[in-house]
Amino acid sequence: MSSPAPSPLLIGCAAGFSGDRTDAAGPVVDTLVARLRAPDAPAGQRAFLIFETLAERTLALAQLRRRADPESGYEPLLDDMLRPVLARCLAHGIRIVSNFGAANPRAAARHIARMATELGLAVPAIAVVEGDDLSAPAQRALLRKQIGTGFDALQVVSANAYVGAEPIAAALRAGAQIVVCGRVADPSLTVGPALAHFGWAADDWDRIARATMAGHLLECGAQVCGGYFADPGFKDVPAPEAIGFPIAEIDADGGVVIGKADAPGGVVSEATVKEQLLYEVHDPAAYLTPDVVADIGEAEVAQVGPNRVRLSGVRGHPRPSSLKVNVCHEGGWLAEAGISYAGARAEARARLAADTLRKRLPGLALRVDLIGAVSLFADDEGRLLAGTPAGEARDVRLRVAATHAERAQAERVAREVMALYTCGPAGGGGVRSALTPRLNTVSCLLPREVVPTRFEIVEGTA
């Protein structure tokens, strides 16, 4: 007689990017605990908490912090995100998987161990996943071969491959209570726990694809629960100030129902799920990830209860032979400055100020926006602004921006906007300026066999 299928897996997400709400985890963990302790909870029910905190340039910024301080380089809000829920997670067997290790997973693991000690807890078994960081000198030849000779001119800050779920699953099978990753693909934070829990084969493409799309629905945090969705009177979201972050229920076949934490805000509907399902998907029939090529061409979503939506019809195809690599490099300086004009003929005065700046800053390609008149739909070359007749806007913020490889040249923007106080049109005020080092990105593909990944349990005992 065959053994019964493993119980459904619960995975809650408490962050969709670095800088997300730090109070999101509490309601998610409370809801997971309540479901684990419910009288009708399936035997062997397991729950995970994930935090997705990396965007394309987040790792480069983390690498810069690590250069300044070898014990830095991980998610700066790690303490605020994790400390309030760590004890409850450990007490109820809720395991934690996240990419908040960023450029320094081992330092993040040490920080979590200290956090546990400060809370009076036994240090949990913490694993780090490594292998994504390709910024070492020995790996530059691989990147040069893929990117070309222009690579030699780049001042590389970080180079990271998007690795998959296998090392996460291996760490969990080895007993890790917390898995700290760097640049794994966002959906892999969900696929790893599913592989470990259900024991799927590495080439069970349909099930892995379903778990991948569950991870895709979770990875942006509140977005699938009404965040980045509301349009008053057209798409209403209750209490957006208190959105409950998402929780996925995944079954042994990879089927998924998306719900949310028990919080007063947010909504999970067919519309929110469809929007997130298509978010950043270049080809619905071939969504490339390190774990699988997911096919949602015939996927269906159906409301199965209040704030509960089922996703079905996802298919999978063999995973790509290559991994995506992002190389971030220094890109000079971005200068921004603004000044406001109000009242009669405000727009005309703002346009005169912009024209003055162009003549005063030869050699710099200025981006000019008249916020309140012509801005969001404008273009860097100023074609829309030049082709839009001057209007009668009475509340205008002139914003100018420019980039340059040399800091001294970029700094000219702030000086000239400040000079408009006495040298420009009448009535300008509220000058603000900023100078920011730029990071540019170039991407390439590497054969997955040259990007070996591994895990190690570095704290606690397995």
Image (cartoon, rainbow, N blue to C red):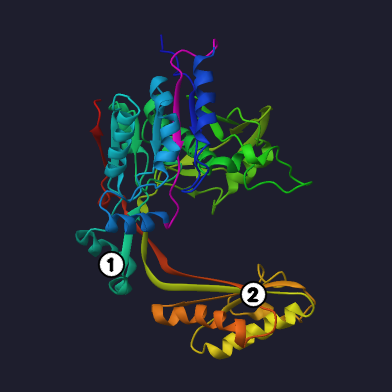
- Image quadrant occupied by the C terminus: top left
Foreground label between 1 and 2: 2
Type of amino acid at the residue the image marks with label 2 = Gly
Residue 250 percent location from the top left of the image: 51, 28
From this view, report whether residue 186 is shown above or below residue 365. above
**Secondary structure at numbered mark 1:** helix
Locate residue 376: give its quadrant: bottom right
From this view, report whether residue 303 is shown above or below residue 323. above
**Would residue 304 be seen by someone viewing this image from the given angle?**
yes
Asked whether 122 or 218 is in front, the reply is 122
Q: In this rendering, would 44 be left or right of 315? A: left
- Image quadrant occupied by the N terminus: top left
Q: In this rendering, would 236 be left or right of 5? A: right
* Residue 408 falls within the magenta-colored stretch: no
Residue 308 percent location from the top left of the image: 64, 29
Q: In this rendering, would 127 be left or right of 79? A: left
**In the rendered image, which residue does mark 1 sit on?**
144
* Residue 51 falls within the magenta-colored stretch: yes
Locate residue 313: give its quadrant: top right
Q: In this rendering, would 172 be left or right of 252? A: left
Q: Magenta: predominant secondary structure element?
A: loop
Locate residue 341: give its quadrant: bottom right
Residue 172 percent location from the top left of the image: 33, 29
Type of amino acid at the residue the image marks with label 1 = Arg
Mark 2 Cα within 10 Å, few/some/many (few <14, many 20+)? some
User: In the image, what residue occupies the spot 33% across and 51% down?
Assistant: 73
Magenta span? 39-57
**In the rendered image, which residue does mark 2 sit on?**
429
Residue 307 percent location from the top left of the image: 66, 30
**Secondary structure at numbered mark 2:** strand
